[in-house]
Amino acid sequence: MNNYRNEILNEFIDRYEKSSYYKGKSEKPRKISIVLHKKFPEYGHSFHYEETNELENIVFQLQSQGFVEFSKKSILGDRELILNQEENCLDRIYKELKRVPVKEKIIHYVKLLDQYYEETFIKDFVDEMKKRAIHQQSLLPYLKVYDENDLENVMKILKGMIDQKDEISFRRFSEKVLGDTKKLEKYKNKIVHIIKDFYDDTLDNENDIFEAFYIRKNPAYVYLKGNAILQINGQIINLNEMHYYFVLPSICIKDLKIKRIDAKQVMTIENLTSFHDVSLNDTFYIFTNGFHNHAIEAFLKCLYDFLGESVHYFHFGDIDAGGFHIYESLIKKTQIPFQMYKMNIEMLKKYKDYTKPLTQNDRKRLLSFKENQNELIDYMLKNNVKLEQEIIGENENERKDINTY
């Protein structure tokens, strides 16, 4: 049996709580009404006599209790109900529905948010959620509106991500913070939005976001190319005997010892195509991808501990905001004095026919790197250009010596 009475009262309260008057944006309440045949299509039809009769009895009860009034033109089959917005009437409706007013929910929710006030990006996130809650704005896509359990789980995940210092699988992390290997999957989209909007908007996809906090769906690997001898758990690996490249699993890095590197320079390369193609004299290569792989960071630190300043360090990547971000992240996270290789105005001019125009987001991101790359970024902004690294160096004559940086 339909509970028409509750449906009517709940819709009235829903619309009342969304009104400008309830939110304090209007001094006087505006009429809130329900036209019965629009809400209940069966109302007023001869084939639905019982439903019509039941609804008539209910609305007359609501009228007699002072909850609603009928519009002047209200008749059987075409009845319009108008909510009585006096405080006493509304209090009685809330009590009957056993419903907590949204303003009380907000006060309680803001108090809960205050419990998660930490000096990390979580602070900015909490501040924004409090602001939205107080002004009765949507919390989507970050949180389910005023849902305590949802808030608790999201904050557990964020806190767990900050505290995670060693590589862990996605499912193990889910079990660690939520007690269930599959539960994190339910929250991942919310976490992605939070991290991009409050932590780092340069992280491009879901995998990069979780990998930035040591959480991986698949094991990590480091791609290496060049003349070197490595030792893992006593086993010698001679890269000189390999014609292509060597893939080092992240799990092996803690047991890695570098025995020898025959190179005058080390180069990190952003894109896999260029990693395969570039062939300079006396150079040892590491493929960085987007450099959200902590295995690469750990290997580079190990490499720098071994080589120190006896070699030069270069990074070769796209001449765009993403490439600059990877370059600066490499320096910041490894403390290695990398220099940019062929990421300059000369290459933009040389390959101008292959450049692409900047998007609005490109321009915004480029400005954040302007302090360190002023002349290059000024040129890119003025000429509306960016360049992918795969374009550079297709002529083999350009690949004989590194002194073109």
Image: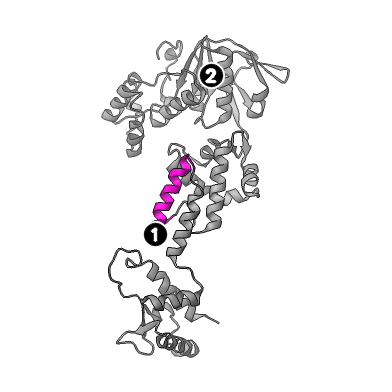
Q: Residue at x 58, y 10 (%)?
A: 262
Location of residue 285 with respect to 190 vertically, above or below: above
Residue topped by disc 1: 136
User: In the depicted view, which residue is nearer to us: 263 or 335?
Assistant: 335
Q: Of the numbered discs in the image, which one, if any, rests on residue 285?
A: 2
Amino acid type of the residue that numbered disc 2 sits on in the rendered structure: Tyr
Q: What stretch is highlighted in magenta?
A: 118-139
Residue 248 x/y as whole percent: 63, 25
Main SS, magenta region, reads helix
Q: Is residue 390 visible?
A: no
> Could you classify mark 2 by the number of other residues whose Cα lies within 10 Å: few (under 14), some (14-19), or many (20 or more)?
many
Colour convention of the picture: one colour
Q: Can residue 15 be seen in this view?
A: yes
**In this picture, residue 212 sits left or right of residue 76:** right
Q: Nearer the viewer, mark 2 or mark 1?
A: 1
Q: Which residue is drawn at 40% across and 19% down?
A: 342
Quadrant of residue 354 within the rendered picture: top left
Residue 91 x/y as whole percent: 43, 75
Residue 72 x/y as whole percent: 29, 87
Residue 255 x/y as whole percent: 68, 22
Q: What element carries label 1?
A: loop
> Could you classify mark 1 by the number of other residues whose Cα lies within 10 Å: few (under 14), some (14-19), or many (20 or more)?
some
User: In the depicted view, which residue is nearer to us: 168 or 247?
Assistant: 168
Q: Is mark 2 on a helix, strand or loop?
A: strand
The mark that comes first in sequence, 2 or 1, is 1
Residue 124 lies in the magenta stretch: yes
Amino acid type of the residue that numbered disc 1 sits on in the rendered structure: Gln
User: In the depicted view, which residue is nearer to us: 50 or 96?
Assistant: 96
